[in-house]
Every structure is written in C-alpha cells, then in structure tokens.
Amino acid sequence: MNAILDFNNGYDEGYGVGYELGVQFAVTGVDKSVDPVKDDTSEDIISLGFATYSVEALDYAAYPEDTGLLYSVLGLCSEAGEVADKVKKHVRDGGDYDKLRMGIQKELGDILWYCAAVAREYELNFATIPIVNLEKLASRKDRGVINGSGDDR
Ligand SMILES: [Mg+2]
C-alpha cells in the first residue's frame, strides 16, 4: 500500500499561502512488493495529511509524558544516526543497494515519527512544518542566500 502525504490536508487554513504539493511514500510492512520510488502509481493509494499522520502516529507513543521534551529530541537524533549507520556500513561492506534503500526508507519513517513527537512536545503544529520550511527556502532563494549559513538568514 502506498500513501500520499498532502501538505494541504490538515493544516490551519489561515496559515501560509498554501502549496500544491504531494509527496509519496510507501507504508512499509504493508506491501513489500511495492517499490515506493518506482511503483508510485499503485492503486492502493490512500491520502494521508500531515495532521492525520501526526495524530495516528503519536497514538503509538510510549514514553513517559514528563520526559517528552528531552525524549523526543534524543529519539530524533538517534534515528538520524541510524540512517548514517546504514550508509556507513554499506560504504564499508557493500551489499544490496535496494536493501539499503528500503532500510533508509524505514529510518526516514522513524525520523518522521520523531519529528511529529518533537512538534507535539514543543507545542508546534506538525502540519505546518513542511510549509514553514518551504517558505524559508523560497525566501532564501529569493534573497540569494540559499548557500549561506545560519538559521535565520
Ligand atoms: Mg529506526
């Protein structure tokens, strides 16, 4: 089964200018015969907004509530490290490139989960995260500072 993340679905209507965007990814563990990159026209497509994802994904949260501010950020960093570890081992040992890709896919899902968790813990609307990011990137490009450094350029 594939799913479509529709950035327009679920965020505050009054926020931003609204982007016509969609990102496809495979829900791993549902149908492993579907390649998320090559088979993006699967008939088993569902629409899933960032807000919906956040609510459903965080229903699986199992950390103590009073640890959320720290736990969620540590988890995000840990999952990013898992991506690096898979690539590192592939560089060292070689192996099946498609297996690496599918491993990275799963870890990116874990990163997404922790992004939703961090957003919740820091009282941010997860559905606005991609919109705010795109606005930042567009602004940087317009001002010719896309290759500079610093969070607030
Ligand atoms: Mg992981």
Image: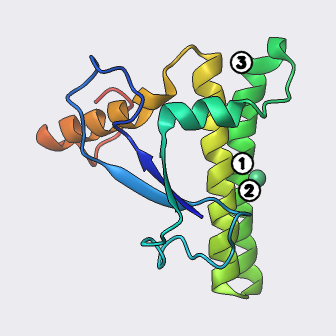
The type of colouring in the image is rainbow
Looking at the rendering, which quadrant does residue 108 occupy? Answer: bottom right
Whether pointer 1 and pointer 2 mark residues with C-beta atoms closer than 8 Å, the reply is: yes
The residue at the point 49 percent across, 37 percent down is 50
Q: Please name the amino acid that badge 1 sits on.
A: Glu
On screen, residue 113 above or below 79 = above
The response on whether ligand 1 sits within 8 Å of label 2 is: yes
Query: Which residue in the protein does label 3 denote?
Result: 69
On screen, residue 80 above or below 2 = above
Query: Which residue in the protein does label 2 denote?
Result: 82
Position of 51 with respect to 80 (left or right) is left
View extreme (front): residue: 43
Task: Give the CA distance from mark 2 to mark 3.
Answer: 21 Å
Task: Kindly state the secondary structure of the residue where label 3 is placed.
Answer: helix
The residue at the point 70 percent across, 87 percent down is 96
On screen, residue 107 above or below 33 = above
The response on whether ligand 1 sits within 8 Å of label 3 is: no
Position of 76 with respect to 124 (left or right) is right
Q: Residue 79, labelled with which disc?
A: 1
Whether pointer 2 and pointer 3 mark residues with C-beta atoms closer than 8 Å, the reply is: no
Q: Please name the amino acid that badge 2 sits on.
A: Glu
Q: Please name the amino acid that badge 3 sits on.
A: Leu
